Amino acid sequence: TFLTPREQRAYSFINGVLESLLLFFGKNTCLLHASVVEKSGCAICFPSTGGTGKTTLSLLLVTRHGFRWMADDMALLTGDGRVSLYPRYIMMYPYNLQGLTTLSRTFFRRRNMLDRIHWMVKAQINGPKGVRRRVPPNMLFGERLVKTAPISQVFFLVRCPVLGFQQEDVLPRRLADICTHVILAEYSHYINYLRYWEATGFAPITVEILRANLSDTYERAFAQAMKCQLIRIPVSATPAMLEEFIVKVIEDA
């Protein structure tokens, strides 16, 4: 990942300081591993593990369906059900830009020739997941950004060996437990340090208390949503197929 010195300092602060403080001491505010878009004043969240297609889905919804951008990969969520724009830049891979000609032009417009060549060579050698860049969302979307909005719908995305797309309504409690497992796995390095501190008797918070706090905040937030669902995606489903399915689900709501 190419980062300018300023971007590297910002990333180090966000990743090394801000996120650990939010994780351990966030109280009523927590990190949610999700992409988020907004429409008509309401936030729609797509929590998931990595590699399920949530970023590409959000890009498609913003560029083709009039949604506005809120978060990629990580969002800020409060117990009263509000989602806020997170300062981390969007992580872009070649596969995120496939089929999005206008967005691709915007992405490359502000990159120098050496950067473009590196991108093309790496993508050719390593494939569509073999190179990445962090991009400020306002560079891609201009004014189509929203800083905060109340949560309206939550769709947990999971790819699995099913024959077709499946929807399952889930209770906020169950969805909260799933998202808690995901965020703790995402920050397993912090959790490992916390367990070391527990062993010495100097931990600022125990892992079990942290787990309970996260789950409680998620549950209270998801309880504000009109719809909470688990979406099972066929392993072979393309981004366009997921886009078509999700748009219909959102419209039906």
Image (cartoon, rainbow, N blue to C red):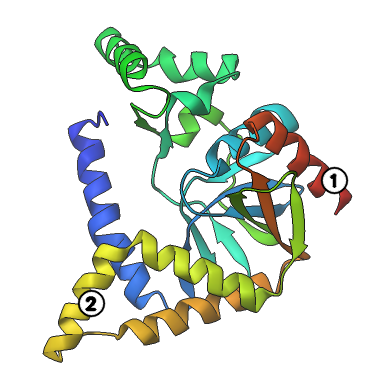
Dot 2 amino acid type: Leu
- Give the structural element (helix, strand or loop) at label 2: helix
The image shows residue 66 at horizontal and vertical percentages of 73, 33
Residue 130's mark? none
- Quadrant, the C terminus: bottom right
Residue occupying image coordinates x 30% and y 69%: 21
Callout 1 environment at 10 Å: few (<14), some (14 to 19), or many (20+)? few
- Give the structural element (helix, strand or loop) at label 1: helix
- Whether residue 88 sits left or right of residue 118 in the image: it is right
Dot 1 amino acid type: Glu
Residue 194's mark? 2
Residue 79 visible within the image: no
Residue occupying image coordinates x 28% and y 54%: 15
Quadrant housing residue 241: top right
- Whether residue 155 sits left or right of residue 195 in the image: it is right
Q: Is residue 17 above or below residue 146?
A: below
